[in-house]
Amino acid sequence: MKKTDEFDNRVEIQWCPGCPNYGILNALKGALAELGKSPHEICLVSGIGQAAKLPHYLKCNFFNGLHGRAIPVATGINIANPDLTTIVVTGDGDCYGEGGNHFIHAIRRNPDLTVFVHNNEIYALTKGQASPTTPLGEKRRLKMSGVEIPPINMPAFAIMQDCSFVARGFAGDLKHLQDIMVRSIRHRGMSYVDIIQPCITWGTHPVSWYKERVRRIGDDHNPEDKNSALDIALTKDGFIHTGVLYEVPSGNIFASRFRKEVTSRPLTGLEIQSPEKIHELLLKFKPV
Ligand SMILES: Cc1ncc(C[n+]2csc(CCOP(=O)(O)OP(=O)(O)O)c2C)c(N)n1
Ligand SMILES: [Mg+2]
């Protein structure tokens, strides 16, 4: 059995045939296998959307919660059990729109999480409405005269706010994406990868349009150089630059600060004082 097969889940996939999300799923399986991880060591967390369905298709622990709310749940999981590799899988709408507030403040808190954003520049699950990354002027059913406000550049924002790992990947360059995923999961502290994922049903451009414009960042870029990382993230030369934009050693992790203030050990390391009381409590939730 191949190491990646360990992560196969026998669930019927609901994405459109040919969706680049399949490639992202395979890259993630490849990255986890490359890191030597087993399914029980991973916890995937997601909200709502096409991207957020990914945890259903991978065999490991997962929590699928409310729209935009994956990051706070994942932060709690990381505090309770820091031994789990906790990965948030989210979309541009879920993470930058509904969950934007959580994302911004997670960067400041610095939990030990990896956040993969499938950025298809629209709300795909709900049939193509404009999201925070839809280009200016783009006409949509609910934006008949075109989107009138500019898209958010979240990688640039994250670099500016000192998120210690910021990268951009492309679902049409899977080997490169897998390498980025491996590096981001290895990184201690909050790591964030914006993944260009052309939507073949509701998107503005076909995959070929992106293939012509995606450029890997050259080896001469030093990811510790914040100004140069910002320069690349802000460049408007018609190309989409992929690779690790910014990577610096992470500061204080949220879970360790939390433990100093609240408890000396993670919840999974605490002894259960009265198991009978927990049993009593659980009985209250038993269906009648
Ligand atoms: C609180 C709330 N608001 C709105 C919705 C409807 N809704 C479901 S998915 C979605 C958009 C998802 O977009 P994105 O995160 O970009 O994922 P994609 O489907 O594009 O992968 C919306 C608006 C919802 N489920 N819950
Ligand atoms: Mg989307």
Image (tube, rainbow, N blue to C red):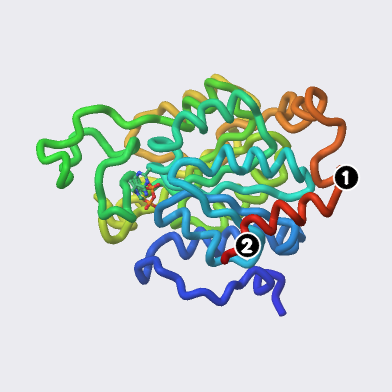
Residue 187 horizontal/vertical position (percent): 70, 40
Residue 286: mark in rendering? 2
- The residue under the point 86% across, 44% down is 269
Q: Residues within 10 Å of mark 2 (few under 14, many from 20)?
A: few
Q: Give the foreground label among 2 and 1.
A: 2
Identify residue type, mark 1.
Gln
Name the residue at the left extreme: 145
Q: Secondary structure at mark 2?
A: loop
Residue 61 placement, left or right of 103: right
Residue 3 placement, left or right of 192: right
Which residue was labeled with disc 1?
A: 273
Residue 121: mark in rendering? none
* Quadrant assignment, res 152: top left
Above or below: residue 216 compared with residue 237: below
Q: Residues within 10 Å of mark 1 (few under 14, many from 20)?
A: few
Residue 189 horizontal/vertical position (percent): 69, 34
Residue 177 horizontal/vertical position (percent): 55, 52
Identify residue type, mark 2.
Lys
* Quadrant assignment, res 246: top right
